[in-house]
Amino acid sequence: MLEYRPGRWLNDAGEFSQDRPGQPRMAYFPFGMGPRVCIGEGFAWMETILVVATIARQRRTRVLNEVKPLPGPMLRTDGPVQALIHRRAVERRAPDAG
């Protein structure tokens, strides 16, 4: 069937349910997984890394609270990370005498 049926995502109470019987796992993410993954994902990751690296060159970060990493496949902490971000001091170079 090639029609948009938004009601297929609702349970009997009329609320959204990802666990709706008959729906494939992760079916609600139409461009996020499998053969329909976003074609710009690789570019987005590269762009994110470059933006973070550029900001990190200009800023200094100081963590304010104790951070405990949790074991597992993803890098996670046991709670929020509180940090201050300061602008780095600008280095002044002497003009070349040449």
Image (cartoon, rainbow, N blue to C red):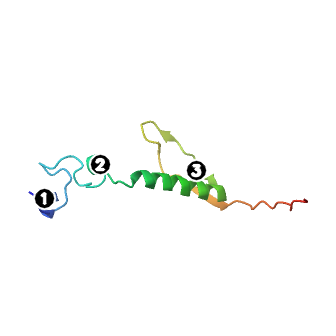
Amino acid on which disc 3 is placed: Asn
Mark 3 element type? loop
Residue at the spot 86% in from the left edge and 61% down from the top edge: 94
Query: Which is more foreground, mark 1 or mark 2?
Result: 2
Residue 84 x/y as whole percent: 61, 58
**Mark sitting earlier along the chain (3/2):** 2
Separation (CA) of disc 1 from disc 2:
19 Å
Is residue 82 in sight in this rendering? no
**Mark sitting earlier along the chain (1/3):** 1
Residue at the spot 21% in from the left edge and 53% down from the top edge: 18
The residue identified by callout 1 is: 8
Please state, as top left, top right, bottom left or bottom right, where the N terminus lies in the image: bottom left
The residue identified by callout 3 is: 65
Query: Which is more foreground, mark 3 or mark 2?
Result: 2
Residue 64 x/y as whole percent: 61, 53
Q: Is residue 43 left or right of residue 90?
A: left
**Mark sitting earlier along the chain (1/2):** 1
Separation (CA) of disc 3 from disc 2:
36 Å
The residue identified by callout 2 is: 33
Dividing the picture into quadrants, the one containing residue 13 is bottom left
Are dots 1 and 2 in contact, CB under 8 Å? no
Query: Which is more foreground, mark 1 or mark 3?
Result: 1
Q: Is residue 48 left or right of residue 59?
A: left
Pick the front one: 73 or 29: 29
Q: Which mark is residue 93?
A: none
Residue at the spot 33% in from the left edge and 54% down from the top edge: 38
Amino acid on which disc 1 is placed: Arg
Q: Residues within 10 Å of mark 3 (few under 14, many from 20)?
A: few
Q: Specify the farthest residue to the front.
A: 98
Amino acid on which disc 2 is placed: Met
